[in-house]
Amino acid sequence: MAVAKIKVIVVDDSAVVRQVNRETLARESDIEVLAACPDPVAALEKMRVQWPDVIVTDIEMPRMDGIAFLKKVMAERPTPVVVCSSLTEEGAATTMEALAAGALAIITKPKLGVKQFLQDAGDDLVTAVRAAARANMGRVRMTVPRPKLGAEAMLAARPGAGAGSALHNTTDKVVAIGTSTGGTQALEAVLTQLPRTSTGIVVVQHMPEKFTALFAQRLNGLCAMEVREARDGDRVLPGRVLIAPGGRHMLLQRSGAQYLVQVRDGPVVNRHKPSVDVLFRSVAQVAGRNALGIIMTGMGDDGARGLKEMHQAGALTVAEDESSCVVFGMPKVAIEMGGVSKVLPLDRIAQEIITYGR
């Protein structure tokens, strides 16, 4: 029996973007492009005839903007949405609103050289569409405001990070969280439940550059803890959440009994930058049993190996369970690899962090 194809509608006022995205997706044997529309009004007309499995849409468009389109879709029939948006600060701010309204993933496009960029980023688009098609939309909370390298690509040349030299006596604790597709809503659900004095937290959320700073600002306005995009040398302190900047890796470092973060450029790892594996493996080396590792919703396997290393180093490790994940990919692989101490639903993860910090 033939496997049903993922049915996609592309919505963008740029004819070039529509053409390239349509051609990129249509080349895949498991994807069918139902239509490529110049604006949401035209898309909704097509959707009345046949509803797609996934929508790929811009935000700034004529007749109806992408945010209004997204909210209408989510109110009528919640459907996975991938946003194809500008890299500008203004575009990033609007896209954060789209994530808050239920969009699952972001594909970025520059102002110049759009056709070449989209062709180069074709794999990212296809991966995002496949991940979105597998999403559990019942778990999405709508609110209103390359080569695959391993983590050793970033860790191998790192001075003073060997396991033998890393674990000096300290009582300081750290919580490391990794997440991807569906993670913006999952992080909000967890972090908004934590008191101001909670253990210091380091986070990798797969997200392009320019978006992480705005994401952190949004969470900072909702959480009792201080939330900000990490800067190189920032201390990990109780009451502080540091989010890895898009386009940079974040690693944990020790200075005496204190934890700091390193923010470094480098190759993509597991097709991501920042990579969860890079963070988790550095935490295993530097913090060992003084850490709590948490892997949540996301497609792929980034973070699974790093979580296992944390587990082997004596850390407590947690995976979000299948019932509460938007995409049960990263946690599933981590569980299968044997690196998970506990499997918990999303609504119990905040309490686990609170208990761990006592």
Image (spheres, rainbow, N blue to C red):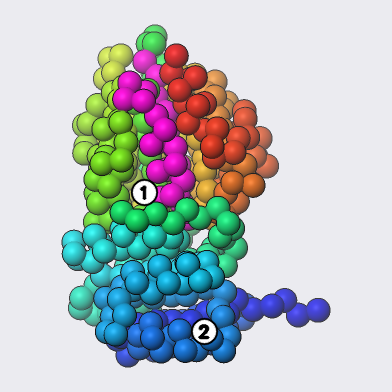
Q: Is residue 226 left or right of residue 352?
A: left
* Residue 204 visible at all: yes
Return the residue at label 2.
47
Q: Give the mark toward the camera: 2 or 1.
A: 2
| Closer to us: 11 or 331 | 11
Q: Residue at x 21, y 31 (%)?
A: 233
Question: Which numbered dot is residue 227?
Answer: none
Residue that appears at 59% across and 38% down: 345
Estimate how packed mark 1 is, as few (under 14), some (14 to 19) or many (20 or more) residues with alpha carbons within 10 Å.
Answer: many
Residue 41 on image: x %, y %? 38, 86
Q: Residue at x 64, y 47 (%)?
A: 323
Q: Are discs 2 and 1 less than 8 Å apart at CB?
A: no
Q: Quick one: label 2 or label 1, which is nearer the N terminus?
A: 2
Spatial CA distance of label 2 from label 1 is 36 Å
Q: Position of residue 64 (x, y in %)?
A: 31, 80
Q: Is residue 238 above or below residue 157?
A: above
Residue 149 horizontal/vertical position (percent): 46, 52
Across and down, in percent, residue 119 comes to 38, 79
Q: Is 104 on the left or on the right of 249, as rendered?
A: right
Tell which residue pokes out farthest to the front in this image: 75
The quadrant of the image that shows the N terminus is bottom right
Q: Which residues are magenta?
A: 172-198
Name the amino acid, label 1. Pro
As rendered, which of 144 and 88 lies closer to the eye?
144
Res 95 → quadrant: bottom left
Residue 112 among those drawn in magenta: no
Residue density around tag 2, few if under 14, some if 14–19, many if 20 or more, within 10 Å: some
Instruction: Provide the residue designation for mark 1.
Output: 274
Where disc 1 sits, the SS reads loop
Q: Amino acid at mark 2?
A: Met
Q: Is label 2 in a helix, a strand or a loop?
A: helix
